[in-house]
Amino acid sequence: MQDPLSYALEILKRDIENFNRACSGAGRWLFDRGFADNAGFLDLMGISRPEEFDRACRNYRYAGPIFVAPPWQAIYHGDEDRIQDWQEAKATYLAVTAAWRSYGYDLVELPKTSVEERVAYVQERLA
């Protein structure tokens, strides 16, 4: 990636649009990623978080729970979309979860079980 900060700012813009769209509608929304993920990625790359990120993380609050999938070496494999090696994946997890916690979120770690069991786990906590 040639310009990670510009990329992160574009993602932030889209995240804000999606968040506002969710807030203007009815029902429950689940997000695959959130504002603090982006902040964690910047931290991992050694790039200072611009004020826009701190402002978004403070002002656009998720109701939670915030589910996180811990690194799981037994099922981890790289491909054309998942370009990180195992060490990078672990470092990313640590940076992202630290960013979420730095903004006051409690995280719920998903169990290392089958997809079906994870789905049931999430559904139970959302009920």
Image (cartoon, rainbow, N blue to C red):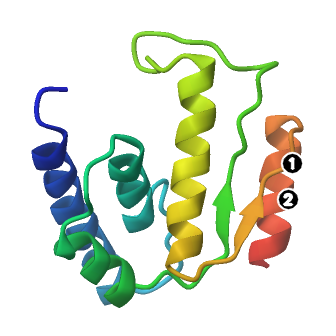
Q: Which residue is mark 1?
A: 111
Question: Mark 2 and mark 1: span between their CA atoms?
Answer: 8 Å
Q: Residue at x 52, y 54 (%)?
A: 96
Q: Residue at x 59, y 72 (%)?
A: 101
Q: Is residue 91 left or right of residue 60?
A: right
- In terms of image quadrants, where is residue 13? bottom left
Residue placed under numbered mark 2 in the picture: 121
Asked if one can make out residue 97 in the rendered structure from this viewpoint, the answer is: yes
Looking at the image, is 63 positioned above or below residue 106? below
Task: Classify the position of the N terminus by image quarter.
Answer: top left
- Secondary structure beneath dot 2 equals helix
Locate residue 4 relative to residue 83 in the image: left or right: left
Please tell me whether residue 53 is drawn above or below residue 41 in the rendered image.
below
Residue found at x 32% / y 75% = 19
Tell me which amino acid carries mark 1: Pro
Does residue 55 lie above or below 88 as drawn? below
- x and y, in percent, of residue 68 in the image: 66, 55
Crowding near pointer 2: few (<14 within 10 Å), some, many (20+)? some
State if disc 1 and disc 2 touch (CB < 8 Å).
yes
| Residue visible at 14% across and 53% down in the picture | 10
- Numbered disc in front, either 2 or 1: 1
Answer with mark 2 or mark 1, whichever residue precedes in sequence.
1
Q: Amino acid at mark 2?
A: Tyr
Percent position of residue 3, x then y: 11, 36
